[in-house]
C-alpha cells in the first residue's frame, strides 16, 4: 500500500550498473516499492563522472531523464543530442538509448512507470528491438 513519504538522497545507498564493468556510473534509487511505501513510479538520480557512459540499452517501459547538473550527450535511437541542465528527455519503450558524460560530473533524475526498480528490464543494444 502506498502512502505519502519523504526520501532524502543521502539515505539511498549508491549502486552500480554496467554490464561491461567499464565505468563507475552510480545510481541512487529514491522511489521503489521494495524500499519505499510507494507504487506506480520508480525514480532516482544517476551520477556519471568524467568520461562515463551508460551504455546503449532499452527497456520495455518508457523512461524520462531530467539533467540536474553537468553536460554530455544522449543517443536516442539514431539521434545524438546535447544534454544540459534543465533538459528533459522522454525515451519511449524499446528505444535504444545511451548517456555519455563529458568533463566533470553529470547528474540526472530518472523516472519509470513501474512499481519497483527490480521490475525494469535492461536489454543491451544488440538484444531484439525495433530501435
Image: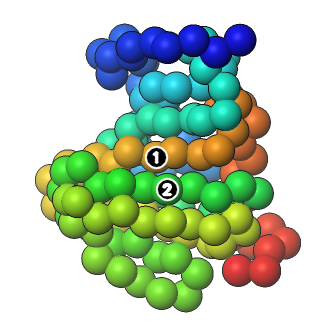
Q: Relative to 86, say whether 15 is above or below.
A: above
Residue drawn at x 52%, y 76% is 76
Is 84 displayed left or right of 46 in the figure? left
Residue drawn at x 46%, y 46% is 110
Graded by Cα atoms within 10 Å as few (under 14), some (14 to 19) or many (20 or more), the crowding at tag 2 reads: some
Q: Position of residue 123 (x, y in %)?
A: 73, 58
Q: Could you say which disc has been placed on residue 64 in the image?
A: 2
How far is the residue under mark 2 from the one under mark 1? 6 Å
Q: Position of residue 94 (x, y in %)?
A: 72, 68
Is 121 displayed left or right of 74 in the figure? right
Asked whether the viewer can see residue 35, the reply is no
Graded by Cα atoms within 10 Å as few (under 14), some (14 to 19) or many (20 or more), the crowding at tag 1 reads: many
Element assignment for label 2: strand
Q: Position of residue 32 (x, y in %)?
A: 60, 25
State the residue in front, 104 or 88: 88
The picture quadrant where one finds residue 35 is: top right
Say whether disc 2 or disc 1 marks the residue closer to the N-terminus.
2
Residue lying at the far right of the rendered structure: 128
- Is the C-beta separation of discs 2 and 1 under 8 Å? yes
Residue drawn at x 57%, y 12% is 3
State the residue in front, 107 or 19: 107
Residue lying at the far bottom of the rendered structure: 78
The image quadrant where one finds the C terminus is bottom right
* Residue under pointer 1: 110
Amino acid at each position: 500500500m502506498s502512502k505519502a513519504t519523504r526520501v532524502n538522497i543521502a539515505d539511498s545507498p549508491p549502486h552500480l550498473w554496467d554490464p561491461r564493468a567499464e565505468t563507475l556510473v552510480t545510481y541512487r534509487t529514491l522511489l521503489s516499492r521494495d524500499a519505499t511505501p510507494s507504487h506506480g513510479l520508480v525514480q532516482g538520480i544517476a551520477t556519471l563522472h568524467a568520461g562515463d557512459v551508460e551504455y546503449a540499452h532499452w527497456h520495455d517501459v518508457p523512461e524520462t531523464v531530467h539533467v540536474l547538473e553537468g553536460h554530455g550527450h544522449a543517443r536516442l535511437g539514431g539521434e545524438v543530442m546535447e544534454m544540459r541542465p534543465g533538459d528533459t528527455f522522454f525515451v519511449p519503450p524499446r528505444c535504444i538509448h545511451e548517456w555519455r558524460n563529458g568533463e566533470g560530473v553529470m547528474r540526472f533524475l530518472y523516472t519509470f512507470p513501474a512499481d519497483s526498480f527490480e521490475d525494469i528490464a535492461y536489454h543491451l543494444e544488440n538484444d531484439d528491438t525495433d530501435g
